[in-house]
Amino acid sequence: MSLYRDTGVVLRVQKLGEADRIITLLTRRHGKVRAVAKGVRRTTSRFGARLEPFGHVDVQFHTGRTLDVVTQVQTLDAFGAGLVGDYSRYTAACAVLETADRLTLDEGEPALRLYLLVVGALRALSGRERDPSLVLDAFLLRAMAFAGWAPALAECARCGLPGPHGSFSVPAGGSVCAGCRPAGSARPAGETLRLLDALLHGDWETAEAVGQPARREGSGLVAAHLQWHMERQLRSLPLVERRAAATGGRRPVEHAATGDRTPSADMV
Amino acid sequence: MYEGPVQDLIDELGRLPGIGPKSAQRIAFHLLAAEPADVTRLQEVLQRVKEGVRFCDVCGNVSEEERCRICRDARRDPTVVCVVEEPKDVLAVERTREFKGRYHVLGGALDPLSGVGPDQLRIRELLARIGSEDVREVILATDPNTEGEATATYLVRMLRDFPGLSVTRLASGLPMGGDLEFADELTLGRALSGRRAV
């Protein structure tokens, strides 16, 4: 019997048969792993809620013929508990998971940097300190950078002329100079490109100082850039609820789903 | 590969959820050996379910008429509405014999990973119903998993502006017949925070 153990984030779950699920995890050492969790949908399952999406878990697998089988699970971080209480954070976190799933095509190929990035993004989203929309865009930009598709922001994507430049072309791969500018290029505000650069490099002070119009424009460019390179639409991205930063950041927990209320009737 | 109709039947059965090629073959040969009357009955039921069953105009549950049995029943309390994901959840709550109110079936849960957003569910119908009927309490009985909890969060946000409406969520905690030792942290945490005086 061949057993192995790893830590991972649950990216997706699919129903299998009567009470089982196929769990897709992004693991630290084994990359993307699809494994069967037997009986997980029964209320008496010993896995319980540990194998829900967004769960950061320590898992033991048993190597199977086609799919591996989950034998033991322990929770490292239950990010889901913090995310489901805020719909905009939940939708942003869904987009993080779907992107991570799509970017790791081959199962078993290690993707340590992406794994760490996903854990960091989920921690930031469930931490409720930063605007979820900014966290998502920062994740998408950095995940694209790992995949080799980082948009050129400080120089021309075609000729490499140092910028900043006023045009942005998704097919060209980022900002473009006046000489290389293809027809149909967008003309984002200078603030928008500065925001994207700050998000790509983790400069949160600059990013959070940027106003709503530039954030919206930046999100649009990031989404277009990602989907162009992936050659497919992400299902969760149009459903991400992007709210104004004033309400998106530090709202109090208003819902019993987060489990921090004491009355037995669980009145909401 | 079998010849003609037998293989067609196996292929069709194999498209049903949870039925693999072996099960499909077993069911096909069972039907082949069954009494003609049994097969005719199955055939009629299948036809009736497709032609005769519709969704209730009020709650979205499966029904034979415009309004389902529960919505037609005058003894059911119209001021309490239990919101569930699927028609099969209505049956689960009905089995408890504890609930005397009415239902609203959403038709699923908010699941962006599968492309299901608020517009794909019967949320607008729920809001219209609460606005027009004398509903005093909405019980959110979506599944206690990630998608169900997110759906409940979203509904709370949509419902909290209705004056005089109380919104409640099903309690969650440890299942009967389980061991505390095997309870996961999330469930046990919920059970602790939702503890009650005895």
Image (spheres, coloured by chain):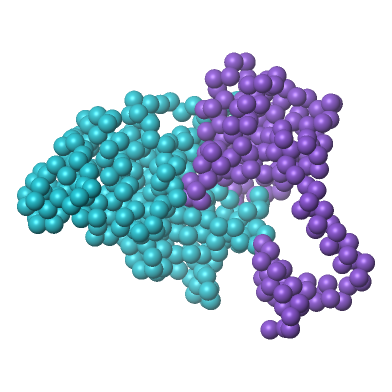
Chain colours: A cyan, B purple
Residue A178 in picture, x, y percent from top left: 10, 47
Counting labels gives 0
Residue B93 vs B40, above or below: the answer is: above
Q: Nearer the viewer, residue B39 or A246?
A: B39
Question: Residue A205 is drawn in which quadrant?
Answer: top left
Residue A41 in picture, x, y percent from top left: 63, 53
Q: Is residue B36 left or right of residue B140?
A: right
Write the residue at 50% across / 48% down. Answer: B115
User: Of all residues shown, which one is farthest toward the top?
Assistant: B164
Q: Nearer the viewer, residue B144 or A235?
A: A235
Q: Nearer the viewer, residue A265 or B91?
A: B91
Q: Is residue A19 left or right of residue B37?
A: left
Q: Is residue B187 left or right of residue A94?
A: right
Write the residue at 93% across / 67% down. Answer: B37
Residue B108 vs B70, above or below: the answer is: below
Residue A143 seen in the current view: no
Write the residue at 66% across / 26% down. Answer: B129
User: Of all residues shown, which one is farthest toward the front?
Assistant: A183
Write the residue at 55% across / 22% down. Answer: B160
Question: Residue B35 is drawn in which quadrant?
Answer: bottom right
Residue B94 seen in the current view: yes
In the picture, the quarter occupied by the C terminus of chain A is top right
Q: Is residue B125 left or right of residue B6?
A: left
Residue A166 in picture, x, y percent from top left: 14, 42
Residue B12 in picture, x, y percent from top left: 70, 69
Question: Residue A202 is drawn in which quadrant?
Answer: top left
